Amino acid sequence: MRIAVVNNFFPPRAGGSSHLSESLARGYAAEGHEVLVLTAAYQDAPEIEERDGLRIVRLPAFMLPQTRLAVSFDISFTSRPSLLRRVRRLLDDFRPDVIHQHGQFFDLTWATSLYARKRGVPVLLSIHTRLENPRARYAKVFRGLDAAMVKPFMWRSKPRLVVMDVLMQEYIESRYHGAYSGLVPIPVGVDPDWVLGGDGQRIRDRHELGNSPVILSVGHVIPLRDRVALVEALPEVLAAVPDAKLLICGQVYYNLFAERARSLGVEHAVIAAGKVAKSEIPDYLAAATVESHEQGLGLGTATLEAMAAGVPVVAPARADNFPGIALRDGENVLLSQPGDVAGLAKRLISALTEPGLAKQIGLNGQALIRERFSLDRVLQRHLEVLTEMAASRR
């Protein structure tokens, strides 16, 4: 097959959808398929790059201002008068059998949707992020953008949508009803091996952690993952474990957690490491006693990678978060209710003070990832769907 992979986010830009789309693209190529990647220019990455069996084309882009409406996130857009013409030329030269898009609110997704409609190319769309914001006025704006911008472009190509969890399915059915041709349940895939073997002492030395128990929190800090609940849980956690530290590993786009830490008098226990290279994530995981970060309600790539490393995870998630895959509280994860700060603190204290329980949860979580979330398994499921779609076109 000739597979076009489309994502405004692609390495060297960090992020869950960026790394997943790269891993899948490399997997497609390793299985013998031709792969063209269309993405947005980022920093000094080359405009055209050929590696790992991929041909990567980075289109000229501009960065949106980091505003609260844009969830204070660095989002690159490629829109300009020549975009449709350039995309059409690149894809006509490549002649894709199928297009795999990542991210429903990117202009490259919209441009390739128009192309797919005109050329009759089937589209698989992976939606990684829900357009939501905890502030009511911004939530209304996002809902309007979904209705006025995202859904009309989606309706043109009628993609099949990858459903990664039940929350995403509920979101899709609410926002995009009638604009897609079907739903395919495929969870996020992670490489369970690359997170192993980290040097935790390097991180402890770097941040002067000593032997302190570490609550690691991996991922960019944005309004939907603001770490405020973790900070609000710290007074109770520190009462039980006085030397505990909250180590936040990710770019800070929204610093309400720091203001809250100062107001609660726990800023001495909070360390913001900032943006961290992907190669260093195994070291941070090796230094962790427990991992936890808010993601609205649900589990993302960072959580699954922590579980793959054998780190016990405290998560605000439903037991049925992944269709057909059981999350068992106290067995392979520690679950808390969103907004329940006391419950979150209780779960964190259990992980920090009961080493036997924490170790067993870490081992069980690691086994679950290998069995149900390994990248090889997820890759093969994607290829099954893409092959079926390409065959239907022929």
Image (tube, helix red, strand yellow):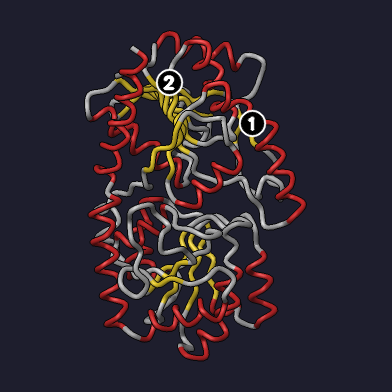
Question: Which of the marked residues, 1 or 2, is nearer the chain's N terminus?
Answer: 1
Q: At 52% across and 59% down in the image, what residue appears?
A: 295
Residue 49, visible in the rendered structure: yes
* In this rendering, position of residue 183 left or right of residue 114: left
Residue extending furthest toward the right = 137
Q: Name the residue: 40% across, 83% down.
A: 350
Q: Give the number of the disc on residue 174.
A: none
Q: Is residue 165 above or below residue 214?
A: above
- State the residue at coordinates (46%, 85%): 243
Front in this rendered view, residue 1 or 321: 321
Q: Position of residue 207 (x, y in %)?
A: 45, 71
Question: Which class describes the residues within 10 Å of circle 1: few (<14), some (14-19), or many (20+)?
Answer: some
Against 217, residue 155 (above or below) is above
Q: Secondary structure at mark 1?
A: strand
**Along the horizontal axis of the image, is 177 left or right of 293?**
right
Amino acid marked by disc 2: Pro
Residue 189, placed above or below residue 38: below
Mark 1 or mark 2: which is in front?
2
Residue 159 x/y as whole percent: 48, 27
| Residue 125 coordinates in the image, percent (x, y) | 46, 32
Q: 346 or 49: nearer the eye?
A: 346
Q: Residue 332 lies in what quarter of the image?
A: bottom left
- Mark 1 sits on what residue? 62
Picture disc at residue 122: 2
Position of the N terminus by quadrant: top left
Nearer to me, 378 or 75: 378
Q: CA distance from mark 1 to mark 2?
A: 29 Å
Q: Which amino acid type corresponds to the residue marked 1 in the rendered image? A: Phe
